Image (spheres, rainbow, N blue to C red):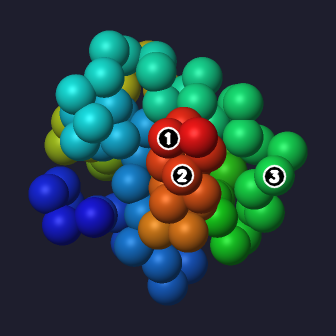
Amino acid sequence: MSAVEPIFHSGDETLSLRQLDELNGLPKGSSFRWFKACEAELEEGRDYHYLPADEHAALIDELRRSGRIYPATRHLVLLTRSGYEYMRSRSLG
C-alpha cells in the first residue's frame, strides 16, 4: 500500500475506497461495488473499518478536504491490507 498515503485508523494502515479506485486505475465507485460483493466474507475491525458519519464527522471532513475520500462520502469504509488483499485475490479468481 505504498503508492498512496495510508490513513491510520485503530492502529492499522488503511485505504479509502477512493484511494483504491485511484491505485487500481478504476472508475469512481468500482471499489465500493467490489467491497459490497466481498463484505460478507470480510471481518469488520480486521479487514475493514466502518466509520459512521455521526461518530467520525471531523475525520471524514478532514479526509474530504485532503482529497483522500470522495466529496460525497458520508459514512466511511477504510480497508486494511488484509481486506484489500482478500478482495484483490477474489477479483483475480
Question: How many angstroms separate mark 3 from mark 2 (CA)?
Answer: 13 Å
**SS under mark 1:** helix
State the image coordinates of residue 21 (x, y, percent, origin top left).
33, 31
Q: Kindly indicate whether the residue at mark 2 contacts the one at mark 3 (C-beta within 8 angstroms).
A: no
**SS under mark 3:** helix
Q: Kindly indicate whether the residue at mark 2 contacts the one at mark 1 (C-beta within 8 angstroms).
A: yes
Q: Earlier in the sequence, mark 3 or mark 1?
A: 3
Amino acid tagged 3: Glu
Question: Which of these two is toward me, 55 or 19?
Answer: 19
> For mark 2, what is the residue?
89
State the image coordinates of residue 10 (x, y, percent, origin top left).
55, 78
State the residue at coordinates (43%, 63%): 14
Q: Is residue 51 visible?
A: no
> For mark 3, what is the residue?
41
State the residue at coordinates (49%, 48%): 88
> For mark 1, what is the residue?
92
**SS under mark 2:** helix
State the residue at coordinates (34%, 63%): 7
